[in-house]
Image (cartoon, rainbow, N blue to C red):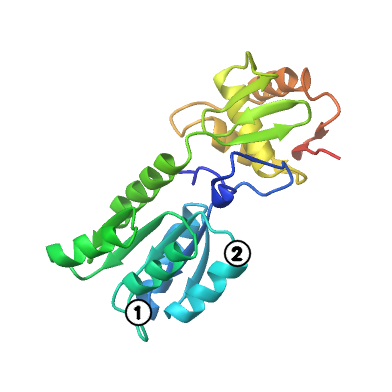
Amino acid sequence: MWASLKEIYRHKPNFEIGVLLALKILLLEDDKLFNETLQDFLEEENFIVDCVLDPYSALDLSYDTNYNLYLFDVNLPYESGFDLLQKLRASGDDTPTIFITSRDDKNSLKEGFTQGADDYITKPVDLDELLLRINAVLRRQVRTQVVQVGEYEFDTLRKTLSLKGVKVELSVKSSELLFVLLEGQGEVVPLEQLKAHLWSASEEASDGALRVYIAQLKKYFPEQIENLRGVGYRIQFR
Protein backbone atom coordinates (compact mmCIF):
# COMPACT_ATOMS: atom_id res chain seq x y z
CA MET A 1 0.00 0.00 0.00
CA TRP A 2 1.22 3.47 -0.83
CA ALA A 3 1.63 6.02 1.87
CA SER A 4 -0.29 8.71 0.05
CA LEU A 5 2.55 11.23 -0.63
CA LYS A 6 5.17 13.35 1.00
CA GLU A 7 4.86 17.12 1.31
CA ILE A 8 1.80 17.86 3.23
CA TYR A 9 4.47 20.18 4.69
CA ARG A 10 2.55 22.17 7.28
CA HIS A 11 -0.49 21.43 5.13
CA LYS A 12 0.45 23.77 2.31
CA PRO A 13 -1.87 22.98 -0.62
CA ASN A 14 0.82 23.08 -3.31
CA PHE A 15 4.42 22.01 -3.66
CA GLU A 16 7.10 21.88 -6.32
CA ILE A 17 7.52 18.79 -8.42
CA GLY A 18 11.14 18.41 -7.35
CA VAL A 19 10.05 17.35 -3.86
CA LEU A 20 10.06 13.60 -3.40
CA LEU A 21 6.61 12.19 -2.93
CA ALA A 22 6.57 10.33 0.37
CA LEU A 23 5.17 11.16 3.76
CA LYS A 24 7.48 11.90 6.68
CA ILE A 25 6.80 10.73 10.23
CA LEU A 26 8.53 11.58 13.51
CA LEU A 27 8.36 8.53 15.79
CA LEU A 28 8.96 9.00 19.52
CA GLU A 29 9.07 5.72 21.44
CA ASP A 30 11.51 5.00 24.27
CA ASP A 31 11.28 1.21 23.93
CA LYS A 32 14.11 0.66 21.44
CA LEU A 33 12.86 -2.70 20.16
CA PHE A 34 9.31 -1.45 19.63
CA ASN A 35 10.70 1.72 18.08
CA GLU A 36 12.62 -0.36 15.54
CA THR A 37 9.60 -2.58 14.87
CA LEU A 38 7.42 0.43 14.09
CA GLN A 39 10.13 1.97 11.94
CA ASP A 40 10.51 -1.20 9.86
CA PHE A 41 6.76 -1.52 9.38
CA LEU A 42 6.23 2.11 8.39
CA GLU A 43 9.17 2.16 6.01
CA GLU A 44 7.79 -0.94 4.31
CA GLU A 45 4.64 1.15 3.76
CA ASN A 46 6.81 3.79 2.04
CA PHE A 47 6.84 6.34 4.83
CA ILE A 48 10.04 8.19 5.69
CA VAL A 49 10.55 7.74 9.43
CA ASP A 50 12.80 9.63 11.85
CA CYS A 51 13.05 7.76 15.15
CA VAL A 52 13.96 9.14 18.58
CA LEU A 53 13.90 7.72 22.10
CA ASP A 54 13.29 10.85 24.19
CA PRO A 55 11.14 14.00 23.96
CA TYR A 56 14.09 16.41 23.88
CA SER A 57 15.36 14.83 20.67
CA ALA A 58 11.84 14.90 19.24
CA LEU A 59 11.51 18.60 20.05
CA ASP A 60 14.82 19.39 18.34
CA LEU A 61 13.84 17.51 15.19
CA SER A 62 10.41 19.14 15.09
CA TYR A 63 12.11 22.54 14.84
CA ASP A 64 14.46 21.42 12.08
CA THR A 65 12.16 19.32 9.92
CA ASN A 66 8.64 19.59 8.53
CA TYR A 67 6.80 16.37 9.36
CA ASN A 68 3.47 15.16 8.11
CA LEU A 69 2.69 13.19 11.27
CA TYR A 70 3.91 12.70 14.83
CA LEU A 71 3.64 9.28 16.49
CA PHE A 72 4.31 9.78 20.21
CA ASP A 73 4.46 7.43 23.17
CA VAL A 74 3.15 8.94 26.42
CA ASN A 75 5.28 7.40 29.19
CA LEU A 76 8.71 8.81 28.40
CA PRO A 77 11.89 9.88 30.19
CA TYR A 78 12.12 13.54 31.25
CA GLU A 79 8.53 14.45 30.34
CA SER A 80 5.41 12.83 28.98
CA GLY A 81 4.23 12.80 25.41
CA PHE A 82 1.31 14.91 26.60
CA ASP A 83 3.68 17.61 27.85
CA LEU A 84 5.65 17.53 24.62
CA LEU A 85 2.56 17.94 22.46
CA GLN A 86 1.37 20.79 24.66
CA LYS A 87 4.65 22.62 23.97
CA LEU A 88 4.38 21.98 20.24
CA ARG A 89 0.79 23.18 20.04
CA ALA A 90 1.65 26.28 22.09
CA SER A 91 4.39 27.09 19.57
CA GLY A 92 1.89 26.93 16.70
CA ASP A 93 2.85 23.47 15.46
CA ASP A 94 -0.35 21.81 14.24
CA THR A 95 1.23 18.67 12.79
CA PRO A 96 -1.23 15.74 13.08
CA THR A 97 -0.39 13.60 16.11
CA ILE A 98 -1.27 10.07 17.19
CA PHE A 99 -0.45 8.83 20.68
CA ILE A 100 0.63 5.20 21.06
CA THR A 101 0.51 4.27 24.73
CA SER A 102 -0.14 1.61 27.33
CA ARG A 103 -2.44 4.04 29.18
CA ASP A 104 -5.97 2.89 28.49
CA ASP A 105 -7.90 4.81 31.16
CA LYS A 106 -10.43 7.48 30.26
CA ASN A 107 -8.54 10.27 32.00
CA SER A 108 -5.44 9.65 29.88
CA LEU A 109 -7.56 9.46 26.75
CA LYS A 110 -9.19 12.77 27.64
CA GLU A 111 -5.85 14.42 28.38
CA GLY A 112 -4.40 13.24 25.07
CA PHE A 113 -7.18 14.82 23.06
CA THR A 114 -7.20 17.92 25.26
CA GLN A 115 -3.53 18.50 24.45
CA GLY A 116 -4.32 18.37 20.73
CA ALA A 117 -3.96 14.74 19.64
CA ASP A 118 -5.75 13.61 16.49
CA ASP A 119 -5.97 9.97 17.54
CA TYR A 120 -5.02 7.69 20.42
CA ILE A 121 -4.20 4.00 20.16
CA THR A 122 -3.39 1.68 23.06
CA LYS A 123 -0.73 -1.00 23.28
CA PRO A 124 -0.37 -3.75 22.26
CA VAL A 125 -0.65 -2.19 18.82
CA ASP A 126 -2.11 -3.97 15.83
CA LEU A 127 0.08 -2.63 13.03
CA ASP A 128 -2.61 -2.90 10.37
CA GLU A 129 -4.96 -0.90 12.58
CA LEU A 130 -2.23 1.67 13.16
CA LEU A 131 -1.79 2.07 9.41
CA LEU A 132 -5.52 2.59 8.94
CA ARG A 133 -5.55 5.24 11.65
CA ILE A 134 -2.52 7.01 10.17
CA ASN A 135 -4.11 7.18 6.74
CA ALA A 136 -7.41 8.35 8.22
CA VAL A 137 -5.72 11.18 10.13
CA LEU A 138 -3.80 12.28 7.05
CA ARG A 139 -6.95 12.22 4.92
CA ARG A 140 -8.73 14.44 7.41
CA GLN A 141 -5.86 16.91 7.40
CA VAL A 142 -5.36 17.15 3.66
CA ARG A 143 -8.18 16.79 1.20
CA THR A 144 -6.11 17.54 -1.87
CA GLN A 145 -2.46 17.62 -2.82
CA VAL A 146 -1.79 19.43 -6.07
CA VAL A 147 1.53 19.10 -7.84
CA GLN A 148 2.45 21.68 -10.44
CA VAL A 149 3.63 19.68 -13.47
CA GLY A 150 4.76 22.18 -16.07
CA GLU A 151 1.59 24.03 -17.05
CA TYR A 152 -0.61 21.26 -15.65
CA GLU A 153 -1.73 20.41 -12.13
CA PHE A 154 -1.85 16.85 -10.85
CA ASP A 155 -3.95 15.99 -7.81
CA THR A 156 -1.98 13.20 -6.19
CA LEU A 157 -4.83 12.00 -3.99
CA ARG A 158 -7.54 11.89 -6.62
CA LYS A 159 -4.97 11.14 -9.36
CA THR A 160 -6.45 13.66 -11.76
CA LEU A 161 -4.69 15.94 -14.23
CA SER A 162 -6.02 19.39 -15.06
CA LEU A 163 -5.09 22.50 -17.01
CA LYS A 164 -6.24 25.83 -15.60
CA GLY A 165 -8.96 24.09 -13.64
CA VAL A 166 -10.22 21.97 -16.55
CA LYS A 167 -9.83 18.23 -16.08
CA VAL A 168 -7.76 16.36 -18.65
CA GLU A 169 -9.24 13.00 -19.59
CA LEU A 170 -6.84 10.20 -18.71
CA SER A 171 -7.52 6.51 -18.26
CA VAL A 172 -7.25 5.13 -14.75
CA LYS A 173 -4.05 3.28 -15.63
CA SER A 174 -2.52 6.36 -17.29
CA SER A 175 -3.25 8.44 -14.21
CA GLU A 176 -1.70 5.77 -12.00
CA LEU A 177 1.32 5.64 -14.30
CA LEU A 178 1.78 9.40 -14.06
CA PHE A 179 1.61 9.13 -10.28
CA VAL A 180 4.36 6.49 -10.22
CA LEU A 181 6.60 8.44 -12.60
CA LEU A 182 6.20 11.60 -10.54
CA GLU A 183 6.99 9.70 -7.36
CA GLY A 184 10.38 8.87 -8.84
CA GLN A 185 10.73 11.98 -10.98
CA GLY A 186 14.22 12.49 -12.33
CA GLU A 187 15.00 8.79 -11.92
CA VAL A 188 14.43 5.87 -14.25
CA VAL A 189 11.51 3.75 -13.05
CA PRO A 190 12.17 0.15 -14.17
CA LEU A 191 9.63 -1.56 -16.41
CA GLU A 192 8.97 -4.31 -13.89
CA GLN A 193 8.29 -1.78 -11.16
CA LEU A 194 5.83 0.09 -13.37
CA LYS A 195 4.00 -3.10 -14.25
CA ALA A 196 3.88 -4.17 -10.61
CA HIS A 197 2.19 -0.88 -9.72
CA LEU A 198 -0.26 -0.89 -12.62
CA TRP A 199 -1.39 -4.51 -12.54
CA SER A 200 -2.36 -6.66 -9.60
CA ALA A 201 -1.07 -10.20 -9.17
CA SER A 202 -4.32 -11.55 -10.64
CA GLU A 203 -3.99 -9.40 -13.78
CA GLU A 204 -1.74 -10.03 -16.75
CA ALA A 205 0.74 -7.20 -17.25
CA SER A 206 1.18 -6.07 -20.84
CA ASP A 207 4.16 -4.31 -22.41
CA GLY A 208 1.92 -3.20 -25.26
CA ALA A 209 -0.65 -1.69 -22.90
CA LEU A 210 2.12 0.07 -20.97
CA ARG A 211 3.30 1.68 -24.22
CA VAL A 212 -0.26 2.84 -24.91
CA TYR A 213 -0.47 4.51 -21.48
CA ILE A 214 2.94 6.13 -22.00
CA ALA A 215 1.81 7.42 -25.40
CA GLN A 216 -1.26 8.98 -23.80
CA LEU A 217 0.89 10.79 -21.24
CA LYS A 218 3.35 11.92 -23.92
CA LYS A 219 0.57 13.89 -25.57
CA TYR A 220 0.78 16.20 -22.57
CA PHE A 221 4.45 15.75 -21.64
CA PRO A 222 6.22 15.06 -24.97
CA GLU A 223 9.63 16.31 -23.85
CA GLN A 224 9.47 15.36 -20.19
CA ILE A 225 8.92 11.60 -20.53
CA GLU A 226 11.96 9.64 -21.66
CA ASN A 227 12.06 6.01 -22.76
CA LEU A 228 15.20 4.06 -21.89
CA ARG A 229 14.60 1.14 -24.19
CA GLY A 230 14.37 -2.15 -22.37
CA VAL A 231 15.05 -0.50 -19.01
CA GLY A 232 12.21 1.82 -18.04
CA TYR A 233 10.84 5.35 -18.21
CA ARG A 234 11.70 8.65 -16.60
CA ILE A 235 9.82 11.91 -16.21
CA GLN A 236 11.90 15.00 -15.65
CA PHE A 237 11.18 18.72 -15.48
CA ARG A 238 14.09 21.08 -16.00
Residue shown at the point (71%, 17%) measured from the top left: 216
Q: Is residue 93 above or below residue 192?
A: below
Quadrant of residue 186 within the rendered picture = top right
Read off the residue under disc 2.
65
C-alpha separation, residue under disc 1 versus residue under disc 2: 23 Å
Q: Quadrant of residue 127?
A: bottom left
Q: Residue at x 68, y 28 (%)?
A: 153
- The residue positioned 58% from the left and 59% from the top of the image is 66
Crowding around mark 1 (Cα neighbors within 10 Å: few <14, some 14 to 19, many 20+) is some
> Label 2 is placed on what type of residue?
Thr
- Residue type at the position of mark 1: Asp
Mark 2 secondary-structure assignment: loop
Q: Are marks 1 and 2 in contact (CB under 8 Å)?
A: no
Q: Is residue 106 visible?
A: yes
Q: Nearer the viewer, residue 118 or 167?
A: 118
Q: Quadrant of the N terminus?
A: top left
Task: Name the side, left or right, on which 166 lies relative to 49.
Answer: right
Whether residue 53 is visible to the viewer of this picture, yes or no, is no
Q: Which mark is residue 31?
A: 1
Q: Where does the C terminus fall, quadrant-wise?
A: top right
